Amino acid sequence: MTDAFLLFLSFSIASFIKFDGVFITNLFSLEYVPSFYLILIIFSLSYLFNRLYSFKTYLFWDEMKNILKASFFSLVVILFISFLGKIYYSRFVVVIGITLFVLFEFIWRYLYRKILYKYNLFRTNVLVIGAGEMGKIISQKIKAHTFTTYDIIGFLDDDDKKSNNTINDSKVLGKIEDIDKIIGKVSIDEVIIAIPTAKREELSEIISHLEGKVRRIKFIPDMYQLITFSTDIQDFDGVMAISSSQGLLNPVNRILKRSFDIIFGLVGLLLFLPLYIIIGLKIKHEDGGPILFKHTRIGKDLQEFKMYKFRTMVPNAEQKLQEMLEKDEKLREEFYKNFKLKDDPRITKIGNFLRKSSLDEFPQFLNVIKGDMSIVGPRPVVKKEVDMYYGKEVAQRVFTVKPGITGMWQANGRSDVEDYDERISLDLYYIRNWSLWLDIVIILKTIKSVLNRSGAY
């Protein structure tokens, strides 16, 4: 019913925009009713095929992807029928109407899940087997993604030391042998086995024991941050095979990514041009120094390039840095750990605002257009970082692609991710698992981080 109303609303607005006399009341006229119902049937079947009417524990990004797939398929079918003269709406109304419908669907489904979670409706009760490192990671992910409506009831673990421990507000309820007792007391919809090092026999025993007792069983293989997006599970006559492919080795995908960069870069430049002018005037007015700061960074194939940023520091910042590092050992340790300072006295008043809002990064759209950078990619680092933390072999693997304005690091907390090994592993994860959809997810997550101002300094 909701989708039918949103489709009706979208086509009403699209018709009104075109000013072809079709709006609300006219949609019920004899000419338009059959076309509207035909469109509704096409969408309903497409949504049904993409499992959008089954209540699943999706991440928001996964549901978005399915909505886009279903809507694009519906659009192609509807446009084909319209060329045959069987759709009364103009093709303009069809395209605008479906575009608006997709936007409304995103908003509605996001709010709908949030409301369900807030009022404890239709929650999926989850029991996690394994209270080790992977169990902690899974619980953190679940807490961070309330859209799934997962609710962790607790953990089970055979380690006596973990008995009655609390992990992210959920308790270790007992050992694995206590699972029947737990299921008898609490309604459990899903069990997640988070013991990546478990032997095949152990997993088989747990899964066999749970069959018919819970609706769904998931187990986490020992592949965290290795492969996910680019994997396919195949059944070779009863033998499970996980196949993985590195998308960016495909020349077609590289062309696709470069096209995406150019389009996104041009849109970014044109869209924020008035903002660039205002920021530039503010920087110039503050101390009369240059508007842009050009910094040497490491790019694709370890080649150096000049990365553009709005200047956020005093004009003689490099000289002041050397003086500060020579005088203060603690400051020196902090700088060589992160290659930035949290409370940097060199930052100007306008610079502080630009950093917290991440507006200082916007001139990098110029680097994207030039071909030095990508919209999404590994962190653009300085040579000293490569020498100290990467090593030649790892650096060559990371910088087989162009560095990005944003990436896995920025999308997962930005400067809050302090461990260099973790930063590098996030970049390697991105390269192994690249897809255009992963780029879109990272951009959306980065926007969320920027709006929350998490990890920005």
Image (cartoon, grey):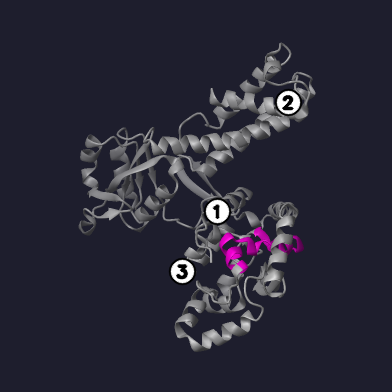
Instruction: Give the number of callouts.
Output: 3
Taking the spot 60% from the left edge, 56% from the top edge, the residue there is: 246
Residue pointed to by mark 1? 451
Nearer the N terminus, badge 1 or badge 2?
Answer: 2
Query: Can see residue 196?
Result: no
Between the C-alphas of marks 2 and 3, the distance is 53 Å
Give whichever of 124, 325 is nearer the camera.
Answer: 325
Amino acid type at mark 3: Asp
Q: Is residue 116 above or below residue 355?
A: above
Residue pointed to by mark 2? 15
Residue 219 placement (x, y as % from top left): 38, 47
Give whichever of 448, 442 is nearer the camera.
Answer: 448
Decide: few, some or many residues near mark 1? Use Cα within 10 Å; few <14, some 14-19, many ≥20.
Answer: few
Decide: few, some or many residues near mark 2? Use Cα within 10 Å; few <14, some 14-19, many ≥20.
Answer: many
Which segment did they paint magenta? 350-375
Residue pointed to by mark 3? 419
Q: Left or right of 59: which side holds 156? A: left
Decide: few, some or many residues near mark 3? Use Cα within 10 Å; few <14, some 14-19, many ≥20.
Answer: few
Q: Left or right of 82: which side holds 400? A: left
Question: Main SS of the magenta segment?
Answer: helix
Between the C-alphas of marks 1 and 2, the distance is 34 Å
Mark 2: which secondary structure?
helix
Give whichever of 433, 386 is nearer the camera.
Answer: 386
Between the C-alphas of marks 1 and 3, the distance is 23 Å
Residue 204 placement (x, y as % from top left): 33, 45
Amino acid type at mark 2: Ser
